[in-house]
Every structure is written in C-alpha cells, then in structure tokens.
Image (cartoon, helix red, strand yellow):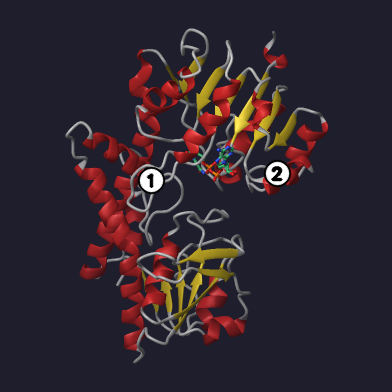
Amino acid sequence: MSEQDQHLAVIGLGYVGLPLAVALAELGRTVTGLDIDQKKVASLNRGSSHIPDVPGEAVRRVVEAGRFAATTDAEALRTPDAIFICVPSPFDANRAPDLSYIRSAAQSVQPRLRKGHLIVLESTTYPGTTEEILQPMLESTGLRAGVDFDLAFVPERIDPGQVESKGWTIKNTPKVVGALTPQGARRAAALLENTFRSVNIALVNELALLCERMGIDVWEVIGAAATKPYGFMPFRPGPGVGGHCIPVDPLYLSWKAREFDFHTNFIDLAAQVNDDMPYHVVDLIVRGLSKQGRALDGASVLVLGVAFKRDIDDARNSPAERVMELLMARGAAVCYHDPHVPEFHVGGNVFHRKRERLASIPLTDDAVSSADCIVVVTGHSAVDYRRVAGRARLLVDTCNAVPRDARTRAKVVRLGAS
Ligand SMILES: NC(=O)c1ccc[n+]([C@@H]2O[C@H](COP(=O)([O-])OP(=O)(O)OC[C@H]3O[C@@H](n4cnc5c(N)ncnc54)[C@H](O)[C@@H]3O)[C@@H](O)[C@H]2O)c1
C-alpha cells in the first residue's frame, strides 16, 4: 500500500487533533476523526472549524474531497491503519494526572485493534503512560505490541495563536517520536519543554515582585536584557500560567518522580510562584482601590481578557479564572470582556462556592468608565488600550498591554513596576 492510500484515524478533534487530521488529509491520506462531542462532529462534517488555527476553508476542502470525515461512532476505528490519540490529559482537583480520557480512548480502540495497526499517543503525559497504561490495555486483546501492532508516543508541539505570526505550523515543527524501543527517555521531551517554560516564567514572575518592591520596572529590565544577542531568552511576567500544557505537564512529571523517591524542587517551586500570581493581582487591585478610598467589597471590576494567552480563544486553566474567583469571594462585582471568549465559567470550587456562567460584555465607553477597576489579564491585540486608559478610573495592567505614552484618566498600576 502506498502512503497516499493510507487510512488514518484521529481520536479527539480539539486544538491538537483537528490540525493533525486536516494536515494528514491535505497530504492526501484518508482521515477519520472520532470525537465524543456530537456538535463538533456535525459542524466539521458541514465543513466548518471550531479551532481558530485551522481555517474553515481547509476543513471544507478536505471534507468535500472525501479525505476527511468526523464521527462519534468508534466502529469507524476498524478500518484505519493507524490511530492517533489526541484526547485531553488534565489534572484532577488534587493536581494528580487525570488519565480517564486516555483510558476511554484506549477502550474505544481495544475491541477494534487488529494486526498491523499503529497506535500513536499524542496526548502529553508522564513518562511510562504508554507502557504502563496503554500497552496493557491494548494487549488484553491477546495481540502483542511490537509484534502484532505498533505502539508509539509522539507528544504534540503546537503553539496556539502563533501560527500566522511566527509561522510554526504542524507541518514544519519537528516532533520527537518514542516507540517501544530504547528511545524511552525521549518521552520526557514534551514535559521537559513545558517545565522549562514554567520554571523560567516563575523566575521572571519572582523578579517582577522584587522589581515592584525596589521601584524598578521589570519590563524595561527584560527589554534591556533582550538586547543581548546570545545566551538570553526573554520570558515575561504575568498574572499566572494557563492552558493545557505549562500548568499541567510539569505536575505530571513531578507526580511520576515521587514514585522514584525523587522531589522535583524546581518544578514545585515554579508552580508555587506561578500559582501565587493571581493572588498578587488581587493585591494590586486592593491597593489601587484603597488609594482611591475604596474597598474591594462592593467594588465593580471589569476583567479584560480571560483566554490563557493573547489572541487565542482557549480559556482552560486561565489565571483569569482564579483572579475572578478571588475577587468575587471578597465581595467584588465582576464582569469581563474578551473578544475571543464569549462565555466563561468560574467558581464551583473552594475559592468561590457558587458556579457561575458569565458572558463577555461589550467594551463600551460606559462599561469602561463606570467600573471601579479595570484589570488587564490577557493583552489581546484587538483591544484599544489607549481608549481604555483614557476612561478607566483605575487600570491594573498585568501583562504590560497599555502603551507607555497612553493618556490616562488615572494612574496605571503595572505588574512588575512601581
Ligand atoms: N492545546 C495545546 O496547545 C496543546 C499543545 C501540545 C499538547 N497538547 C496536549 O494534547 C492533548 C489534547 O489537547 P487539546 O488541547 O487538543 O484538547 P481539546 O480539549 O481541545 O480536544 C480534545 C478533544 O477530545 C475529545 N475527546 C475527549 N475524550 C474523548 C474520547 N474518549 N474519545 C473521542 N474523543 C474524545 C473532546 O471532545 C475534544 O474535542 C492533551 O494531552 C494536551 O496536553 C495540547
């Protein structure tokens, strides 16, 4: 069979699975996408996309060419030659790995596994998942990995929201492959990459707090350091880390390390510093309000940006969630505006008991000028920060989004600067 004739399946059509499925279909393979979400499946088959980095036009082309079809029926896994598992790998309420999605995807494969199949785990997870969880589940069918079917771990590297600006797409980003061979050590690669980011962000977050105490502007410090053409990689402080990777993957590694009596001090310290940042943001708001003679209790706070990163629509594990919960728990009336996230859920946990579903409000002049405080959590480029600065009564900027020369109605409280 030529590569072009290959029939492939992707389980989980989210931020990782859909770009992969469409890229494979564009390469001429026939791709079946399996997802448990009926709505996503129906809209994909109509040729539209729910992932901003995958144009609807690209989905429509591969659907119309008969190269891609989505389904909720796991029976569709019988025919493909290779199956890519791209389901979520979050942590649970106690920050332990939640492998339930990977197990359930493996259960869909189990009764359809056959000789010659290649099963590839793309979800990011701790080293050992492939051999300790996936392999035994698949071998319970009587077929043997490495003999009857192949099993590999290829952690995804995708940088949402950066596809257009930086040009790194699924097609030109190198990937690390670990199969059931001596390449096992490479499996830690994805976790190392995200741990690297988590630790460096924590370092710069800590420096931001120090700069505030010392009356130094951390953003100027980073800008100056970044003029060094070698040996320095700029990381920027912010309200905390979010998303599916940086706050999660290092904890998968540190959880696994404990099995070996090993304490990953850097990972744990980085998580602690990064987790403290939303509390610091609330502190900045409280201080800013009290300078104006106001208390947080009863104040109205408008949060600008709830996605976990600039210019994307993904709000999973966003630091905005904790900031808003802490504000609500202390009596503030909280609303938000995010041009990419129409709806946002907060609470239902120990930080704020009540589970609340909020809708993004329009960023009208009135909404800006009537809020007691505006806090920029995510600096989306679609927001006009000059307009906001000119009308806000108090503006707390956690990500240096407000231009330095903006005309302001009140002083801007900038995280990492005095
Ligand atoms: N989003 C990123 O930027 C990114 C980057 C690199 C790696 N990863 C990793 O890739 C994996 C997937 O992340 P994502 O962001 O694509 O998640 P996602 O939530 O966007 O997509 C996952 C999809 O899987 C579906 N799903 C869940 N259980 C299923 C099952 N049993 N059968 C079929 N479909 C199922 C969901 O409905 C959803 O559509 C995670 O392990 C994540 O850590 C994500």
Residue ID at (40%, 28%): 133
Q: Is residue 103 above or below residue 344?
A: above
Badge 1 residue CB within 8 Å of ligand 1: yes
Q: Which residue is drawn at the image coordinates 40% and 81% (left, top)?
A: 411
Q: How many marks?
A: 2
Q: Which mark is residue 55?
A: 2
The span from disc 2 to disc 1 (Cα, nearest Å) is: 28 Å
As helix, strand or loop, the secondary structure at mark 1 comes to loop
**Residue visible at 66% across and 48% down in the picture:** 50
Residue drawn at x 31%, y 56% as measured from the top left: 274
For residue 28, say whether it is visible: yes
Asked where in the image residue 283 lies, by quadrant, the reply is bottom left
Q: Where is residue 275 in the image (x, y as percent from the top left)?
A: 31, 58
Residue ranking furthest to the right: 64
Q: Position of residue 54 (x, y in %)?
A: 66, 42
When the figure is inspected, residue 342 is found, relative to residue 139, above or below; the finding is: below
Q: Quadrant of the C terminus?
A: bottom left
The circle drawn on residue 248 is: 1
Q: Decide which of 4, 180 is in the foreground and name it.
A: 180
Q: How crowded is mark 2: few (under 14 residues within 10 Å), some or many (20 or more)?
A: some
The vertical placement of 70 against 416, above or below, is above
Q: Where is residue 139 in the image (x, y as percent from the top left)?
A: 46, 17
Residue type, label 2: Pro
Would you say 206 lies left or right of 332 here?
left
Q: Which of 93 and 158 is in front in this view?
A: 93
Q: Which of 136 and 322 is in front in this view?
A: 136
